Image (cartoon, rainbow, N blue to C red):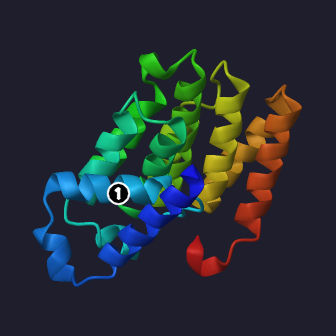
Amino acid sequence: MRHIKISMIALLALALLTGSSSAAEARSVKEQERLLLVLLNAHEYRPNRKLLDRVGKQVNQLLVRISTYRHMRARVRLRALASLAVYPSHRTKQYLLSLFHERSLKKNAVGLLIRRQAIRSAALAFKDGVINDILTLKSDGDAQIREAVAHGLGDTLSTLALPHLRAWLPNERELFVRMAIEKAIKRIKHAPKERK
């Protein structure tokens, strides 16, 4: 029953989002936040800039805000962070980079997920502009963060990451991280030239 209720709410949100762009401009910040939360809770949510822009002018700031809500389900917070990848602004970059080394996110399961998503979102949004920032986590004590670093470097699709990945591969002790490094190397080598 709850699933049906959420689906109906998602349909209502979709109807609101298909309205005119002037309707989006007229929405209050509270209305934009409610609508954004409905989208982030949708069963098969994928970040989409066109759809997110229809929420309203404050969507970028609201995504940051929602990602910080400790009472919110981890999935919603992670989707908010993933959505920031489609808003590559200076503010977004600073926020995502601040999560890389945030002490309060270390040593807990949700914090680990948030740090991993911040790495991936920064890589997708800022490409080779964050390679050095991502590399600062290459020696992190948590192998899952190192795995996210490898995937993040692959997400940049930048050939500038290749020497770092190749040098790191023989020195990484965890098999699943080495596999992520190899996958990142392949992704970059096989990426279409115009995307690099």
* Quarter of the figure that contains the C terminus: bottom right
Residue ID for mark 1: 36
Q: Please indicate, yes or no, whether residue 58 appears anywhere in the rendered image.
A: yes
Which residue occupies the foreground of this view, 153 or 65?
65
Which residue occupies the foreground of this view, 177 or 112?
112
| Mark 1 residue element | helix
Q: Is residue 49 above or below residue 134?
A: below
Identify the residue at image location x=54%, y=42%.
Answer: 75
Identify the residue at image location x=45%, y=54%.
Answer: 40
Report whether 13 appears left or right of 162. Answer: left
Q: Quadrant of residue 68?
A: top left
Q: Please indicate, yes or no, whether residue 94 appears anywhere in the rendered image.
A: no
Q: Quadrant of residue 24?
A: bottom left
Which residue occupies the foreground of this view, 61 or 171?
61
| Residue 188 in picture, x, y percent from top left | 70, 63
Report whether 117 appears left or right of 172. Answer: left
| Residue 93 in picture, x, y percent from top left | 35, 48
Q: Is residue 92 above or below residue 149?
A: below
Report whether 26 appears left or right of 108. Answer: left
Residue reaching furthest to the bottom: 20
Residue reaching furthest to the right: 175
Identify the residue at image location x=27%, y=50%.
Answer: 62
Which residue occupies the foreground of this view, 82 or 2?
2
| Residue 90 in picture, x, y percent from top left | 28, 52
Identify the residue at image location x=50%, y=57%.
Answer: 5
**Total numbered badges shown on the rendered structure:** 1
Which amino acid, by three-letter code, is at mark 1? Answer: Leu
Q: Residues within 10 Å of mark 1 (few under 14, many from 20)?
A: many
Q: Is residue 43 above or below residue 53?
A: above
Q: Is residue 85 above or below residue 110?
A: below
